[in-house]
Image (tube, rainbow, N blue to C red):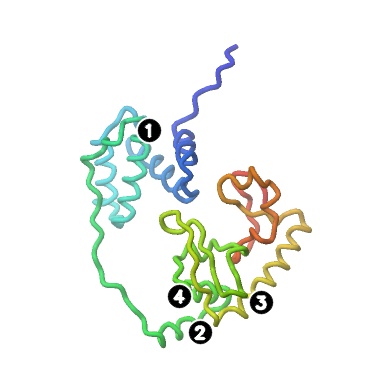
Amino acid sequence: MSDVAPAPKLLDRVRLAIRSRHYSRRTEEAYVGWIRRYILFHRKRHPREMGEREVAAFLMDLSGQRKVAGSTHNQAMSALLFLYREVLGQGSEWGSGLVPALRPVRLPVVLTRQEVAAVLNRLPDPVRLVCELLYGGGLRLLEGLTLRVKDIDLSRGEIRVRDGKGRKDRVTVLPRSVVTRLGGHLDAVRQQHEADLQAGHGTVALPDGLAVKYPSANREWAWQWVFPATRHYRDAATGER
């Protein structure tokens, strides 16, 4: 019997390549999904047996037949370029003949302060709190939704945005108008967290490498989400809830 472990399957190799580069879980799910769709589109042929022509046919079907948005087309193209360049080792010039979709240039819709206030007043908490942080603190949507307790400094009126655009950290303003309500929201979240811990749950996903260095940090209050999910979920990587 051979002691040599079997070579990982293609999609597992894709996942390993993505994780080794510390891409987000959303990117991993999106790339794996597009690569799977590409393989199925060509009737389960192995990508190594195909090339730019097959990739172009798949992308043309997305844009021509399925009428996907330009951003969706480009995400699929990025996934397949990653597959061929980084996983199958075709080199950085592979796919240079593929053309990304052009994004239409549109003027943004800008609301007046009165219009913004009217919209916010119709929202219930915690949705309103999230939107006020986005608007008043200049946060992107995902930055607001992934804030941790340790990122909020109520006394100094600051928000620390970690691993933001360009994978850079920055400090931005915490709007004074939300300090009191945000403090009350955090009190309620802490009570729920303590109840979850009592029930054997209450863990949270940690940034890369931190879980190895500090294995118990995923239960600490400082690392919890400011806006946690409304129900328990099982972490795909650790199996914890």
- Which of discs 1 and 2 lies nearer the camera? The answer is 2
Q: Residues within 10 Å of mark 4 (few under 14, many from 20)?
A: some
State how far apart marks 1 and 3 are (Cα). 54 Å
For marks 3 and 4, the one nearer the N-term is 4
Marker disc for residue 184: 3
- For mark 1, give the secondary structure: loop
Q: Nearer the viewer, residue 5 or 215?
A: 215
Whether residue 203 is situated above or below residue 170 in the rendered picture: above
User: Which residue: 25% across, 41% down?
Assistant: 57
| Amino acid under disc 2 | Asn
Percent position (x, y) of residue 25? 50, 48
Q: Which residue is mark 4?
A: 135
- Cα distance in 3D space between marks 2 and 4: 13 Å
Q: Residue at x 59, y 66 (%)?
A: 227
- Residue 101 place in picture, x, y as percent: 25, 53
Is disc 2 placed on a helix, strand or loop?
helix
- Label 4, label 1: how far apart the Cα atoms are: 46 Å
Tell me whether the residue at label 3 lies in contact with that at label 4, contact meaning CB atoms closer than 8 angstroms: no
